[in-house]
Image (cartoon, grey):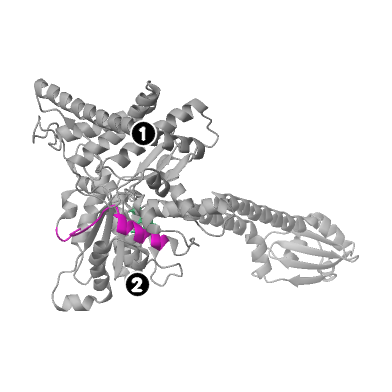
Amino acid sequence: MKIFGKNIVYAFLILFLLAWGFAVLVGSIQETPELSLTELVDKVRAREVKEIVVQSSNLEITLSDDSKFISKKEEDTSLTETLLNFGLTSEDIASFGHKEVNPSGFLFWFQAALPTLITILFILGFIWFMGRQVQRSNGQAMGFGQSRARIVEPDSTRKKTTFKDVAGVDEAKEELKEIVDFLKYPKKFLDIGARIPRGVLLMGSPGTGKTLLARAVAGEAGVPFFQMSASEFVEMFVGVGASRVRDLFKIAKKASPSIIFIDEIDAIGRHRGAGMGGGHDEREQTLNQILVEMDGFETHDQVIVIGATNRPDILDPALLRPGRFDRRVVLDLPDIKQREAILTVHSTKKPLGKNVRLRRVAERTPGFSGADLENLINEGAILAARENKKEISEEAILDSIDKVILGPARKGFVISKNEKRISAFHEAGHALVAASLPNADPVHKVSVISRGRALGYTMKLPTEDRHLYTRSHFVDELAVSLGGYAAEEVVFGELTTGAADDIRKATAIARALVQRYGMSKKVGPVAFGDQSEHIFLGKEIGHERNYSEETASMIDREVSNFMQRAYETAKKVIKSKRDKLEEIAERLIENETIERDEFARMVGAA
Ligand code: ADP
Ligand code: MG
Ligand code: ZN
């Protein structure tokens, strides 16, 4: 738009100059006064004429006093003839100088043609100008079909991502090293007649490092890397997506060996024709084009397509067929060792305090993705910077965990002394029950600093990642959940709304024990309620009831039995260790937070 405006200004400027030049020229011609032929004849008779220059029909007359005039005669009669016709004698005619100027002289023609010339020039200019405009907008329309891939050249000066930057996902790295090998030494594979893999699909929850890994592959292999997010293929206009795909593959093939990375491929790679999300022709066409392009690879095309998605469950099966995305790499949320490794990678360039034990940070961050962990270290650094410290302390990082999970501490949030007391006993209840039951997770931190919606919190975490959970673990955890509730009841003889969230979560666990895990003796090993197949990466969509009313009431009874027993266990613990409870609660009221080591000392555990 800016360029267009500038052009208009130029056009006007040129126009103005032309008009001005024309006016001056015309003016200069007209400046010389004109004589009629009769006047000229009179002046010749009076011997006032010095010279007449003839230029076809134009006469330039110079008088004896050197003043100049112009006049006109008829084209096909000569000047002499004309004058004779006017009754002048040959004597009169000889009295002045007589010059004939070649009528084909440049100046003459130029002068004659100037108005036409200017008009033509102006029209040409106008056409050219319009043409450019059209071309530009045309170019834009053409550009729609071009891929908008971001290209990372192998010798890019930007910092290269390599496998070293990716921590903890060793299996995935192994798998991808093969791809790198292929791109680096294709001959080795081709000689033995191996079919080259065409597509690799990286699957995993958000933030597990899919994009990072793809970049690392490119960095390791040292080949051009074309990155595009699937949603960028699709625009308002039908057919653009397919055309962009064509373009992208064309460029990539030219640059081969190369890598095409299509991020968030589920945006176009959804199950075709599936009802969910509504049919979308454009998406289907784009997807089809990708399939066509991948099928069209020749053996010597060393182009590998890497796709990434966090919803492999909704991908079209055609994408997963051999010859397309036949390699699949699953990236799980990191376990404790992997978390430690990721934390190490991200803290190498940051000034970490000597006391920082990343293992301990890893322990406290189950369920964190690689991206979360990176964010955590960054939050720690910000916190340290805000406090004008030169290095990041463990405390800063641990504080950031709470912040990342529960939201920032609400420092300005004032609670009354009474509420703080209730909250302290509530949290002390959780913590005490957790410390007293053998199968509950150990307490890492107890706090009455309110964060997010919680007035206080008790953080208890497994020392190791678990994949199997026992019934006794759940039973103890239920009791811990009700520890706060029981403490309020025992100490104040009154209940508050503060336990509502605990109860809700505990009930959900109890229900799962009965309905899904077959952990209720009365109900037995039967799963109730059909969890439809969409449980992937922690997402549950449909839930269907497939049991009788009778069974429903039995389930409800069992759920409530679990809860009842848990409540009794919690209450027993609290009653029997009332003095410890008071001690913890008082400490909380005074200090607001009790860390793991101190807590362990207080309850007399290791
Ligand atoms: P996604 O799987 O959603 O594509 P990204 O690859 O974009 O996740 O990861 C986001 C950021 O998280 C990365 O830039 C990196 O800093 C960090 N990260 C994720 N996984 C890892 C990992 N395994 N090792 C190191 N850093 C990681
Ligand atoms: Mg990504
Ligand atoms: Zn609670």
Q: Amino acid at mark 1?
A: Gly
The crowd level at tag 1 (other Cα within 10 Å; few <14, some 14-19, many 20+) is many
Closest to the observer, 352 or 38: 352
Q: Is residue 5 visible?
A: yes
* Quadrant of picture, ligand 1: bottom left
Q: Amino acid at mark 2?
A: Gly
From what the image shows, is residue 48 above or below residue 394? below
Q: Residues within 10 Å of mark 2 (few under 14, many from 20)?
A: many
Q: Residue 6: x and y, percent?
A: 60, 52
Local secondary structure at mark 2: loop
580 vs 213: above or below: above
Q: Which mark is residue 460?
A: none
Closest to the observer, 283 or 371: 371
Where does label 2 land, which residue? 222
Is the CB of the residue bearing disc 1 within 8 angstroms of ligand 3?
yes
Q: Give the residues in magenta.
A: 322-346
Q: Secondary structure at mark 1?
A: helix
Q: Please check the rendered image and state whether residue 329 is part of the magenta-colored stretch, yes or no.
A: yes
- The reply to whether callout 1 and callout 2 are in contact (CB within 8 Å) is no
**Quadrant location of residue 547?**
top left
Q: How many marks?
A: 2
| CA–CA distance in space, label 1 to label 2 | 58 Å
**Residue under label 1:** 429
| Near-viewer residue (178 or 452) | 452
Can residue 148 be seen by looking at this rendering?
no
Query: Which label lies toward us, 1 or 2?
Result: 1
| Point 25% across, 77% down: residue | 185
Q: Which of the two discs, 1 and 2, labels the residue nearer the N terminus? A: 2
- On whether residue 333 falls in the magenta region, the answer is yes
Q: Residue at x 85, y 63 (%)?
A: 44
Residue sitting at x 21%, y 63%: 198
